Image (cartoon, helix red, strand yellow):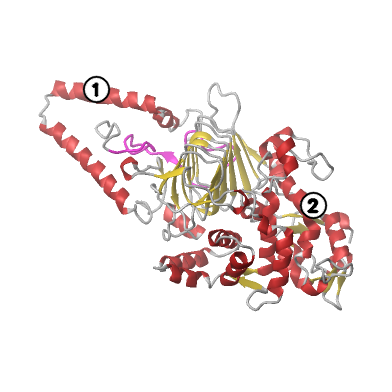
């Protein structure tokens, strides 16, 4: 079989979801990971599965990491695992029943990970390490390896400074560090007394399962995708890669050479999606907008784990989607401004990159939501993990079983409880494996570079007096009619107090016994003040964007439905003015007397 038909590439999700978006501790350098690799092979309970208690012993006792950071890495790796929704819900239920740190630790001790894959996961954290040269000149020196095969300026701009989404950076990382990655798979006997790799070192066949965390490939130009260990279970490929049936292992040098020849850019990555993915045009274009919003997706052809939808430059629009084409996909919202975005499907992951002055409401996100470089964004989500970096003046309403991760560069963030619902929300949460407890929305972990912990000056917890719920302004099918799990008691009490003030106000108006002319004048005054408030706060734009354009299809939600995309449930703006917008409602908000 010709090698020209074989291709191997870095998997998208480990780099996209597994690499923390901050420079790692130097205790995760190759020097220390070599020591860890030798240690786990010689200790009971460490190989082939590594439990939490042994990892905590290694991380805190040997590597001198703080326990919060040790658990963060362990938990992040577990989020990548292909657990069923039922397994995730069972785990959440078990955690929610822990009433003390001792019980929580006992429950965590039941968790274990694949040892070799976890070693490679820890090494992969080097992806976001900033070298001195990079910090001085702004980018790596040009070289054949670091040069993208496409000269598209659009791709370079889209992926710049975001290595988690940059498939060229993933390929360069694997090419540059392949020898170290393979070394971590070796058994201690394959190393010299000084820890150096021997020329005749062998990589056990079983160890390739560890490398399958990072690599997958195809024998048919991407039409049928297999993990690396399954690809190399085929005899013709085993012979090319130096496999010995006698020792059931691969010669290290020959395997490394074969991989270097087979490595290529991910055919389902971001570059391919931008270059040849399915483009979707908007049904509505904002009048006078300089740039047209762009959407590209590969969900019609990519295997699970590689499905991406890229949305860029959504400007002064309301986008509302509940589509099978979104379900289970990795979504990136890039440079969206003054937009209202509702993605009401169960999602795999979401990234908000350089968005401004926008509202984003998400369906349940199985793995993670990452907000980077955003300003004045209101984000509402239920997710396995939230990470925020280099963002300012953002309000985040959250339901999550893990501690929100606040990275360097944040200013004036506000964290509040999840405060909305839509009819199919609970069904979507079940399909994503997300429960209502535990909910750690108000217990952030502030992580700095090199594994340091930041001070708490970059965020605040939303005061109950400022709390107002959000209404999803679309008609959908489903049974959910309230916020799943309810509101925290302090926020529920504040909401009830605000509703009581509304009732008191309405009673005062009724008891004034106004005549017909006085009622007319009073109603006109209220409407005038209400519209002044809408204009002053910018909420008028949101209401106007909910009106479907005459040119759009009957089921198009204010331009949110796109040409060429007919899957999923139509989201129609609610006909009720009072409840049909996401405007915050309460006694202090120009209210309920207008109909």
Check residue 562 in the rendering and tell me which mark sits there, or answer none: none
Dot 1 falls on a residue whose secondary structure is helix
Q: Quadrant of residue 585?
A: top left
530 sits left or right of 582 in the view? left
Q: Is 305 in front, or is 121?
A: 121
Residue marked by disc 2: 176
Secondary structure that dominates the magenta span: loop
Tell me if mark 2 has few (under 14), some (14-19) or many (20+) residues whose alpha carbon lies within 10 angstroms of its own: few
Q: Which residues are magenta?
A: 557-586
Find numbered disc 2 in the image and state the secondary structure of the residue it sits on: helix
Tell me, yes or no, if residue 152 can be seen here: yes
Judge whether residue 10 is colored magenta: no
Question: Considering the image in quadrants, where does the N terminus appear?
Answer: bottom right
Q: Nearer the viewer, residue 408 or 231?
A: 408
Q: Nearer the viewer, residue 322 or 95?
A: 95
The percent position of residue 155, horizontal first and vertical second, equals: 71, 37
Quadrant of residue 226 in the image? bottom right
Q: Earlier in the sequence, mark 1 or mark 2?
A: 2
Q: Is residue 577 magenta?
A: yes
- Residue at left 89%, top 67%? 199
Q: Quadrant of residue 138?
A: top right
Q: Residues within 10 Å of mark 1 (few under 14, many from 20)?
A: few
Question: Could you tell whether 309 is left or right of 167 in the image?
Answer: left
Contact, CB < 8 Å: mark 1 with mark 2?
no
* Front of the two marks 1 and 2: 2
Tell me: residue 70, above or below residue 465. Answer: below
Reading the image, the residue beneath label 1 is 525
Report x, y in % for residue 210: 71, 66
Tell me the residue at 69%/43% (across/down): 273
């Amino acid at each position: 079989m010709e090698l020209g038909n074989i291709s191997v590439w870095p998997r998208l999700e480990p780099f996209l979801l597994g690499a923390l978006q901050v420079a790692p501790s130097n205790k995760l350098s190759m020097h220390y990971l070599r020591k860890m690799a030798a240690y786990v092979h010689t200790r009971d309970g460490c190989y082939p599965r590594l439990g939490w208690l042994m990892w905590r012993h290694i991380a805190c006792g040997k590597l001198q990491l703080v326990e919060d950071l040790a658990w963060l890495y362990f938990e992040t790796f577990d989020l990548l695992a292909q657990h069923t929704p039922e397994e995730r819900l069972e785990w959440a239920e078990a955690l929610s029943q822990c009433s003390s740190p001792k019980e929580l630790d006992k429950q965590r001790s039941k968790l274990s990970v694949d040892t070799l894959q976890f070693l490679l996961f820890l090494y992969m954290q080097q992806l976001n390490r900033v070298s001195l040269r990079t910090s001085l000149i702004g980018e790596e020196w040009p070289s054949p390896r670091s040069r993208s095969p496409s000269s598209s300026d659009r791709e370079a701009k889209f992926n710049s400074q975001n290595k988690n989404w940059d498939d060229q950076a993933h390929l360069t990382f694997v090419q540059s560090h392949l020898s170290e990655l393979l070394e971590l798979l070796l058994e201690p006997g394959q190393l010299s007394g000084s820890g150096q790799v021997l020329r005749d070192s062998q990589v056990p066949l079983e160890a390739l399962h560890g490398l399958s965390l990072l690599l997958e490939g195809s024998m048919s130009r991407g039409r049928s995708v297999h993990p690396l260990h399954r690809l190399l279970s085929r005899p013709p490929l085993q012979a090319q890669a130096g496999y010995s049936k006698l020792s059931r292992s691969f010669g290290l040098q020959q395997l490394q050479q074969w991989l270097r020849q087979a490595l290529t850019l991910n055919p389902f990555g971001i570059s391919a999606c931008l270059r040849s993915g399915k483009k979707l045009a908007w049904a509505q274009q904002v009048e006078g907008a300089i740039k047209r919003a762009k959407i590209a997706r590969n969900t019609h052809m990519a295997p699970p784990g590689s499905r991406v939808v890229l949305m860029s430059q959504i400007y002064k629009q309301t986008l509302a989607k509940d589509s099978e084409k979104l379900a289970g996909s990795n979504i990136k919202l890039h440079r969206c401004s003054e937009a209202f975005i509702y993605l009401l499907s169960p999602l795999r992951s979401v990234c908000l990159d350089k968005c401004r002055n926008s509202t984003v409401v998400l369906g349940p996100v199985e793995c993670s939501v990452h907000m980077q470089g955003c300003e004045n964004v209101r984000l509402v989500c239920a997710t396995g993990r939230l990470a925020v970096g280099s963002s300012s003046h953002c309000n985040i309403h959250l339901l999550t079983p893990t501690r929100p991760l606040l990275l360097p560069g944040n200013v004036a963030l506000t964290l509040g409880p999840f405060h909305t619902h839509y009819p199919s929300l609970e069904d979507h949460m079940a399909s994503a494996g997300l429960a209502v407890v535990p909910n750690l929305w108000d217990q952030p972990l502030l992580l700095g570079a090199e594994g340091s912990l930041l001070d708490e000056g970059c965020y605040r917890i939303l005061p109950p007096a400022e709390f107002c719920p959000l209404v999803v302004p679309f008609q959908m099918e489903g049974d959910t009619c309230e916020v799943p799990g309810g509101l925290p008691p302090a926020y529920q009490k504040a909401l009830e107090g605000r509703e009581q003030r509304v009732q008191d106000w309405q009673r005062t108006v009724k008891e004034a016994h106004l005549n017909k002319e006085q009622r007319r004048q009073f109603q006109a005054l209220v409407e005038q003040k209400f519209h002044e408030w809408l204009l002053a706060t910018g909420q008028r734009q949101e209401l106007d964007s909910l009106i479907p354009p005459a040119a759009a299809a009957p089921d198009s939600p204010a331009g949110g439905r796109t040409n060429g995309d007919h899957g999923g449930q139509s989201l129609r703006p609610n006909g009720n003015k009072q409840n049909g917008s996401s405007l915050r409602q309460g006694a202090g908000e120009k209210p309920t007397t207008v109909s």
